[in-house]
Each structure stands twice: as C-alpha cells, then as structure tokens.
Image (spheres, helix red, strand yellow):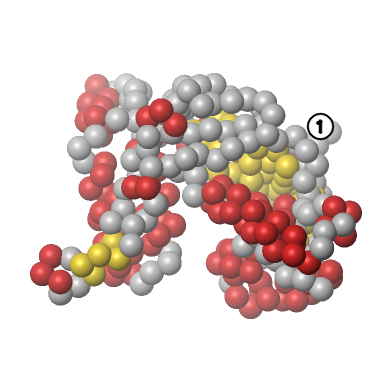
Amino acid sequence: MAAAAAPGALGTLQAGRARLVAACCARLGPGWRLSGSWTVPRVDPATRARGWIPAAGGAAWRRGYSSELKTEDELRVRYLEEENRGADLKERVKMNSSEVGPFVSKIRAVINEIANLPVPTIAAIDGLALGGGLELALACDIRVAASSAKMGLVETKLAIIPGGGGTQRLPRAIGMSLAKELIFSARVLDGQAAKAVGLISHVLEQNQEGDAAYRKALDLAREFLPQGPVAMRVAKLAINQGMEVDLVTGLAIEEACYAQTIPTKDRLEGLLAFKEKRTPRYKGE
C-alpha cells in the first residue's frame, strides 16, 4: 500500500483481488494508519446531506449541503489484506437465522460508509469480485478491471438476494433492466463483458504481476490528486446528491456546493497560480 500522511496521498484497501484506491485529497489528520484492519472516517454531521428544510418565505424547499470535516479526524484508511471475494459461506452456514440479519446489516453499513468517503474512490478488480465483493466495488466512484476478472451478484443462486446495496447500486450503475437480468440470472461477467454493460470504466489486459487494474487505478488517482481538495469533496457531493433528484433540484445542489469553494484560500491560489504560470499549491483551505 502506497500512502503518506499528507495532502495528495493515496490510500489502498485490498479485498482479495479487488482493491479500493482512495485518492486522499483532503488534509489528513493524525488517525492515518497503514496496517491491520481498516476504519471509516467519523465525519462531522455537516458532511451528510441534511434533511429538507424550508427556504426563505416557506414557498419552496431546499437542502443544506456541506463538506466540512473535523480537522483532527478527517480521514482514516487502513489496509485490508484478507481474502474477501464475497461472504464467507462456511461461516454463514454456522449462523442461525437470528444472526444473519444483524451480520448483513453490519456489512451494509460498512459499504455505505465507503460510499460516503469524502474523497474519490476507485475499485480495482484484478480477480474475483462476487456478491459482497462486487457490492463493495459498486460503492466506489469508479471501477476498473482486468479482462480476466470475474464479477457478479450471484446471491440468487443461494436463494437470497444481494444485501450490501447491490439491488440499489447496480441499477443506478447500468440501468434497471440489465441489473435485473444480471441479478435474476446470477451471471458472472469478465472484464470485457462488464465494460460492455457499463459496470466498469476501464478494462485492461492482465499483466504478469496480476495487478493491471490496480496500476490503472493508481494512474487515475494520480490524475485526481493535483486538484483542489475542497473542490473534489464538493464535486463528489454535488454529483452523488444531484443524481437522486430532478434536474432543477440538482442545479440548486450544484449552486450550493459551488458556493462552498468561493471563500476558500485554494480558489485564490488557483487563480494566482494561473496568472503566474505555475503549479498551484493547494492546502485544502
């Protein structure tokens, strides 16, 4: 895992042969870790999309948005090395019915926290991403895979359904009809087929090291890193929230998010760097 506790660092979460690469454009607090299991950030409530509140005069409704993070705990990423292509079926067999629901709820909560990370995330799939493994990838902003990779939501083969967000995120990624077809059939796709249906953004021929998708994910992350940290956070927020509402509301969300960049030091630094024909030095402020 390549990472550093400084602005513009890369973090990696590996799950079997599917890895999550986080382009950490936010300033990193002292919680940055490199080994062991991983934790998600404890985010200030302002980071979440707040509930619907009356606009001035009460004639319409608007939503409050913010990407501010607690300085002391802005982001924590740890490295996960366990094989995690999906659920451990041997473990599940030993569970009684009362244990299954809470277990799946915890998985769903973890995947939701990954989806809510305030930095760009890229899933690199170099091998198997089946069931929960693909649900983890679907929670990322971007997915890339090797042509030899295998991925699918295969739960119906076991007389259950995807429980980590797959029934909701797959239709949003590839459309309802195709998502139903894949879930109903429990079909497994290789990288080329996944690219054809829009499940992944890039497909690569696998290399001798077996990490072609991971290398591509790192290349993409390095493209993201030079950009303004605040802008990256609010751009992700605007896109994610805007896709859940109508266009008029989405444009209002964009306006609210854009407004957060106006008073930042980084915006002024970007303009000055352009004028002086140099690389900007963003600090996430």
Q: Which quarter of the image is occupied by the N terminus? A: top right
Q: Residue 134 location, x and y as percent? A: 70, 55
Q: Is residue 2 above or below residue 56?
A: above
Q: Is residue 194 left or right of residue 148?
A: left
Q: Is residue 220 visible?
A: no
Q: Is the residue 59 above or below the residue 265 in the image?
A: below
For badge 1, the amino acid type reads Glu
Task: Identify the secondary structure beneath mark 1.
Answer: loop
Residue at position x 15%, y 71% in the image: 58
Q: Position of residue 227 (x, y in %)?
A: 40, 34
Q: Residue at x 37, y 30 (%)?
A: 71
Front-most of residues 255 and 59: 59
Q: Residue at x 73, y 70 (%)?
A: 161
Q: Indicate whether 194 appears above or below 224.
A: below
In the image, 163 versus 177, the foreground residue is 163
Can you say which quadrant of the picture contains the C terminus? top left
The residue to which callout 1 is attached is: 209
Decide: few, some or many residues near mark 1? Use Cα within 10 Å; few <14, some 14-19, many ≥20: few
x then y, percent, for residue 147: 77, 50
> Can residue 237 be seen in this snapshot?
yes
Question: Which picture quadrant has residue 131?
Answer: bottom right
**Foreground residue, 224 or 257?**
257
Task: Tell me: 222 left or right of 196.
Answer: left
Task: Find residue 239 and report its horizontal and vertical position in percent.
Answer: 41, 56
